[in-house]
Image: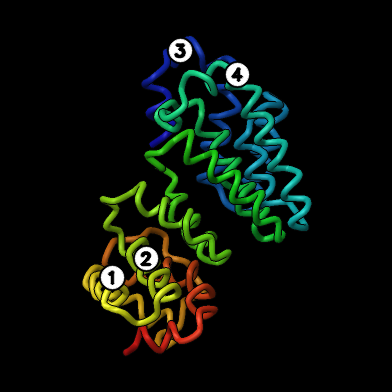
Amino acid sequence: MESALAASADDAGRYASQPPQRAQDLIYDAWEATGARRAALARRALALWPDCADAYVLLAQETASSLEEARGLLERGVAAGERTLGRRVFQEDVGHFWLIFETRPYMRARAALAATLWRLGRREQALDHQRELLRLNPNDNQGLRYRQAHWLLTLEAYDELEELFAAYPDDGAPAFTYTKALAAFRRRGDDAGSRRLLARARELNPHIPAYLTGRKTLPKQHPAYVVFGEETEAIDYAAGAGELWGSVPGALAWLES
């Protein structure tokens, strides 16, 4: 879809022969490929255009033998994205990133870098990257607010967590509501407010508690897509938030009560 939209946004005949566009076309092919071909296409893209940020993301996913190696590749991808966009975009287009196609490879690289830094234990750095991505694109087309909420709750950064919830008051996604309920329980215990949030979360997706508590086992294969209110969403949420729920004393028993 993104490749089609990019082609319609530009004069395809005019730009198709340019190295950046040819490199990005290879990335679109790589996203559809499997196995070693994905990395091979990413390397071809970089050979055509060394500032192809998406190629670094693919190589970090497909070839990195350690988190540190992945971090290095992703940092190169972020730097490539910054060079491609230039200073003007960061000064004049704040708040509209992602709606501008050219920003997307940079944003993908930076989001992937944040996730890798978190796994490396460099948690404040990870949070800083996502804070900046949310500032650049408050519409949050990448869904980073859900991961940010988990991270802030893990670090007990309650004031910032409340600010994050307040920034998206109309977000009725079950994932956000379950995390709000957990945050309320962690701060205040089993009170009327936390129970109200939990009841609302259960209405939105009643399948999530079974996967969080282990009554249902998470499948080895992650769902290819997620449907709100369905089991696919429950699996996706529990895979990302199960450890967090398990770390809060009494939370799983409260969830089942």
Q: Secondary structure at mark 4?
A: helix
Q: Which residue is mark 1?
A: 197
Tag 2: amino acid? Lys
Q: Secondary structure at mark 1?
A: helix
Marks 2 and 3, how far apart at CA: 49 Å
Q: Which residue is mark 4?
A: 87
Tag 4: amino acid? Arg
Q: Is label 1 in contact with label 2 (beta carbons under 8 Å)?
A: yes
Question: Horizontal placement of 206 versus 79: left or right?
Answer: left
In this rendering, the label closer to the viewer, 2 or 4: 2
Q: Which numbered disc, 1 or 2, marks the residue that appears first in the sequence?
A: 2
Q: Secondary structure at mark 2?
A: helix
Q: Which residue is mark 2?
A: 180
In this rendering, the label closer to the viewer, 4 or 3: 4
Where residue 247 appears, as percent x and y from the top left, is: 54, 78
At 32% from the left edge and 74% from the top edge, which residue is drawn?
Answer: 194
Question: Horizontal placement of 163 versus 54: left or right?
Answer: left
Marks 1 and 3, how far apart at CA: 53 Å
Tag 3: amino acid? Gly
